[in-house]
Amino acid sequence: MPTLTLDGRRVHYLDEGAGEPPVLLLHGFPFSAEMWRPQMDALAGPRRLVAPDLFGFGRSDVPADETDGDGWSITAYADQVAGVAEALGLGPVVLAGLSMGGYIALDLVRRRPEMIAALVLADTRSESDTQEVRQRRADQQVFLRARGDVASLADGLADAVVGKATADREALLERVKAMMTANAAEGWIAALEAMRTRADATGVLSSIAVPVLVVVGEDDPLTPPSAAESMAEAIPGARLEVVPAAGHLSNLENPDAFNRVLEEFLAGL
Ligand code: MLT
């Protein structure tokens, strides 16, 4: 399994297939690069797909020296992603982020546009958190600092993100929970900090000058099709695709439809 080191911290990543431009896949919270397995299996070969484990997830090191996540940010993950792209010598990439991965992609759009040949925003939004969501994340951090028990949060979270009409929902819920609980509390705490303090990225949308695919599960309860529509409307020339029978994890819940939409977009570049 490939790893590299950035500022003394180990980063694990998947890197499969060949072809230009590479597709750099950013996972959501609280997952890891493994959430892109259905895309790796179906599309890598003639295409090069690279997916890092963000700090604190999968087999990458936890982000903060204090391991309590204080001060961690979406920008810090974005710097990690840019570091991976540089270390692997990737030229401009097709940057694809799902949910939290999309927050990170939009940070790179603002600060490192030269890295990006095209953009895929999946089940994500450009707005920052509402006050209510910020408070919920802060409560989750308090709980995790005290108890470290990711499993009890994973149950509710998995049930909330997977669409009610998703095929084999029970089996998928077990897979999703296994992915979530494989990550230590420190990784969750840092990501919760990063998400709840993130800046609103809506202002950058109208300046995006590369091809963009906005994709969303039709039953996504967290970042619903209405959020995807407004984002696509604000981005010049963006294409919007709705994945049927899928919730917030559209790439896992209906991989065939998601892969078709992604492959069509890549083929048109
Ligand atoms: C994700 O899937 O990355 C999270 O649901 C994003 C969020 O909680 O805002």
Image: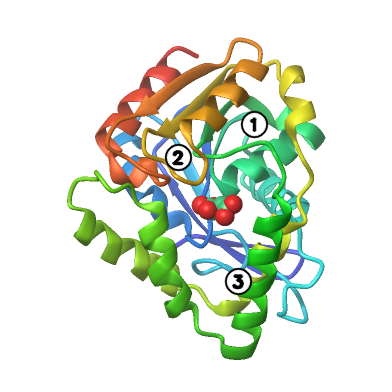
The crowding category of the residue bearing disc 2, from other C-alpha atoms within 10 Å (few below 14, some 14 to 19, many at least 20), is: many
Tell me, yes or no, whether the two marked residues, 3 and 1, touch with CB atoms within 8 Å: no
Q: Which mark is residue 49?
A: 2
The residue labelled by disc 1 is: 91
Tag 2 secondary structure: strand
Q: Nearer the viewer, residue 119 or 220?
A: 220
Amino acid type, residue under disc 3 in the picture: Gly
Residue 242 position (above or below residue 150):
above
The crowding category of the residue bearing disc 3, from other C-alpha atoms within 10 Å (few below 14, some 14 to 19, many at least 20), is: many
The answer to whether mark 2 is within 8 Å of ligand 1 is no
Q: Quadrant of the N terminus?
A: bottom left
Q: Residue at x 66, y 49 (%)?
A: 81
Q: Residue at x 61, y 38 (%)?
A: 125
Amino acid type, residue under disc 2 in the picture: Leu
Residue 230 relative to residue 130: left or right: left
Instruction: Name the mark nearer the viewer: 1 or 2.
Output: 2
Amino acid type, residue under disc 1 in the picture: Gly
Tag 3 secondary structure: helix
Q: CA distance from mark 3 to mark 2?
A: 24 Å
The crowding category of the residue bearing disc 1, from other C-alpha atoms within 10 Å (few below 14, some 14 to 19, many at least 20), is: some
Q: Position of residue 72 (x, y in %)?
A: 76, 64
Q: Quadrant of residue 141?
A: bottom right
Q: Quadrant of residue 248?
A: top left
Q: Earlier in the sequence, mark 3 or mark 2?
A: 2
Q: Earlier in the sequence, mark 3 or mark 1?
A: 1
Task: Specify the farthest residue to the left.
Answer: 168
The residue labelled by disc 3 is: 187
